[in-house]
Image (spheres, rainbow, N blue to C red):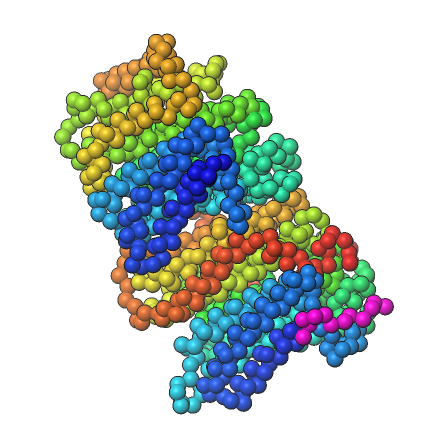
Amino acid sequence: MMPPDPTTPGGALLVLAILLPCAGIILSFVLGGRNAERVALGLTPFGFALACAIAFHVASAGKPIVYALGGLAPPLGIALRADGVSAVMLVAAAVILTAAGFYARAKFATPEGGPESRSALTFWIMLQAIWAALTIIFVGGDLFNLYVALELLTFAAVPLVCIDGRPETLAAALRYLLFALFGSISYLLGVALFYGAYGTLDIPLLAQRVQSTPIVWLAAALMTGGLLAKTALFPLHLWLPPAHANAPAAASAVLSGLVVKGSFFLTLRLWFYVLPALSAAGAANILGALALAAIITGSVLALRQARLKLLIAYSTVAQIGYLFLVFPLATGAHVWSGIGWSAGVMQILAHAFAKAAMFLSAGLLAEALGHDQIARFAGAARALPMTFLTLGLGGLSLMGLPPSGGFSAKWLMLQASVASGQWVWTLPVLAGGLLAAGYVYRILTPALSEGDIMLKAPPKRSREAIALGLALIALALGFAPQGFFDLLEIGRPLAAGTLQ
Amino acid sequence: MSHLSSTLLVASLAAPLALLAACFVKNWRPRALALQWLAPAPGLAAGLLGLTAAPASFDLPGLGFTLRLDPPGALLLAAASLLWIVVTAAVWRERAPDERFGLSWLLTMAGSLGVFIAGDLVSFYLVYALVSIPAYGLFAFSDDAEKKRAGAIYMAFAILGEALLLLAFAALAAGEPHGSSRIADMMAALPASPWRDAILALIVAGFGMKMGLIPFNGWMPLNYAAAPIPAAAVLSGAGVKAGVIGLIRFLPLGVPLQGWGEALAALGFLTAIYGVLLGLTQQNPKTILAYSSISQMGVIAAALGMALGAGDISASGDVAFYAANHLLVKAALFLTIGALAMRGAPLGGWTLALAATLALSLAGLPFTGGALAKLASKAQFVSGWAASLATLSSIGTALLMTHFVARLDAPPPDAARECPSALVRFWPAVALGAILLPWLFFPAFGYVSKALEIAKIWEGLWPVLLGVGLALGLRRLGWTAPRVPAGDSIVLFEGAFTRLLALGPGFETLDARLRQWPAAGVSLLLIVLALLAAGVLG
């Protein structure tokens, strides 16, 4: 029996971080109208501050911070835990959700004194629900708890897809909902198997108890399959392109940048935190092969899209593939596993910021031009220099050119591939970069060429600045110091090269 | 490293970057772009100081970047800075180009100067990307189909080269045992690296693309024909040298690697001869110069190959000198096309003499800078087949350059408009500078008096005379070379690319099938089963 898992200093912050958006949701419901927007935006600085405080605590303590709900240690109670990766993800989510919120003010504002619109109220509440769900996912320490958060995430994300009620968005949202439910069932089955076999769902306790039995592998396979469906890893991506391409820009940025990362984060938790004791090289290679297929197919299809938003959505399919390369590159306790781990987290962050910036820019572009047909972009860069600068900088990170987080991620992935002797994974990394260069070229070249263009309405400078800010963060990640990578190692079970 | 030189070294990179930062403020942008001719000044000073100083590194605190200056880098930095100052000042004096072009120019300049001083892998990769990719904006934003084609092909090779180098660099970093990212430490560890051969192949292919070594030479003629003359001058002069410094930095010259050395030398000589032969089939003076660049880069690759085979680390200085001479002369030759086109009068008298001397400097005409460059490269081509091939390439260069001078009478239609008037007025000074400046630099690398020995003069003269005589003789006989489209083998790459594009619809069909509900359900089931099987059986 393990010793009780006591609450550490700073542990209460985790509860606060979850309660804050939940309180926001209730307040928004109760106050309604313009107040929903005020509450949602007003709480963002506090959410950001809490995330930073948690990161600060984790970094200064050098170990995860824990809060045992009701003072009961697992397996009796439920624990919340924030390690290095959780802390970084909390901050990233806070930044992107805040940016998306302020960007969306123009579209989802409620006029002074007027009646509240259904879409505005839905948007502000769902935005906070996503924040709450992601926070629980990043700090949850119990597999069932995480299932609840995963459901909350899905049910908050689906309405964002069909918020403007057009028939095609409804179809896309339904597709998303149905397939995500498949995923949920699969995940829940796996959770039930774990509970039946070991009587606990607490991650560290399970990690100590699991053995390489068929039941464990079945549970892991079912949970992974469910999570892959929700993450839209190729070939389970049927819902992603229509959903992400048809949602309003602010929603697309959150869906592509953060929501798919939520279920991916749980996949990481499962393999690296629940099952680190098992030799999972075979499973890791299967995930790597799917990643390879995702990168190539997603990038090629991105190259062939006529609409900018669809192009960016297919680029997400490819970039999700990159995320899954972390499995062959970081599984096990090798000297190169740490490099692969850093690469994987860097890829999450770089893609989150770059993709959010690009979707926000695509939204501005579509509003200013009245369409997002790439073939009709001639001269657009002159009319919208800042928007295209953002698209270019985001593209720079997707291509993996320095200085950018995308470059750091690819650089580390290549090093891990070479050092581990798995040269095969250099192929998707490099080919994906080349293909990304192709689709970024396709966006920028017509825009930079000569042409007269009529703007329906010039975009607001502040909204352009928000998108550019996110793209600049994606670039700044390229300068991440060693201390940042040390933070990512905090709480990783095999970080020291041995089992805890 | 002294305080002054480290300050200058940082300023060499900081000055263009500061102007770039200023460009983000809309009102400052025109002023910043107009002032960019001053940006290479610290680089020029640092280069001149570093010519005779011992190699030294400077770590930028906080960023983890290292700057390093050694005499080969210093020479190329000084020559490139000078070129950028002259051409930039002339272009902006005429009239400010549009901002798109101005920004591309500034970015390319920053990268072009940076490659000579970057001392660690990541910053080298960064500045190398800067000198390669933004150069697209110097010639490809146009409605002209041929320029668009040149731009797309240039970009494809630039990005492909970047990808190969990224893999090479990652393998280098993974093989360095102490976690250092300095290039010097990487090179020390490379000969013992388990991935040595793969890394060397990637390095040669990656930088070879930048230098136009065969079979990756086809982009260069298209690029230089499409680029306006000032852009062609800086790209052919300074831009291409990023590939040269790359090979100098990333070949482990201190350890003899005979097989690799011979392979690189053979590739180099093949490129040198190929460039001459294909150049003779061209009519556009810009294209002829591009093929001459291909040929000269071949000579450089051959020299580096010989040095690699012999384990001769001192070759880096000699090769840098050869490259610096090419940098000045090739840029001056591009400006010559414009200057003479603007004068309009048929070539004759001293103009012809000056243009011919400048052109033949590339072939090593005695008393020109080219004679010194040849002397420097001789150290690698001491005897046997290498010496014969080097002489053959000199003859070929003289032949090709005579062809070029003859074609100066028929410049491309835009040549007169593209060349800034200041450069036309000062063209004699530019040409003389390119011929004579190498004499000022040479004492840092060898003894000038050696170039003035009678035997050496004759040794340099006869291949030039032979080449010129051959060219004139062929002209008299009325022989014309068959016409080969500029870019020669590029059509094969384009064909392969078209076939790749034809795979696209297949991917779309696949995607449409997989995104059907039943297919997705089956996929999910299969993935779960596969993971289960991998776990249970593994």
Residue A7 located within the stretch drawn in magenta: yes
Most distant residue in the front direction: B3
Q: Looking at the image, which is closer to me, B54 or A421?
A: B54
Image quadrant in which you'd find residue B443:
top left
**Quadrant in which the C terminus of chain A is drawn:** bottom right
Q: Looking at the image, which is closer to me, A98 or A340?
A: A98
Percent of width and height locating residue A496:
73, 53
Residue in the image at 39% along x and 59% along y: A389
Most distant residue in the left direction: B345
Percent of width and height locating residue A253:
49, 68
Q: Main secondary structure of the magenta part?
A: loop
User: Can I make out residue A238 in this image?
Assistant: no
Residue in the image at 81% along x and 71% along y: A4
Q: Looking at the image, which is closer to me, B313 or B204?
A: B313
Is residue B32 rendered to the left or right of residue B196?
A: left
Residue in the image at 31% along x and 18% along y: B367
User: Can I make out residue A111 in this image?
Assistant: yes
Q: What stretch is highlighted in magenta?
A: A1-12
Percent of width and height locating residue A280:
73, 56
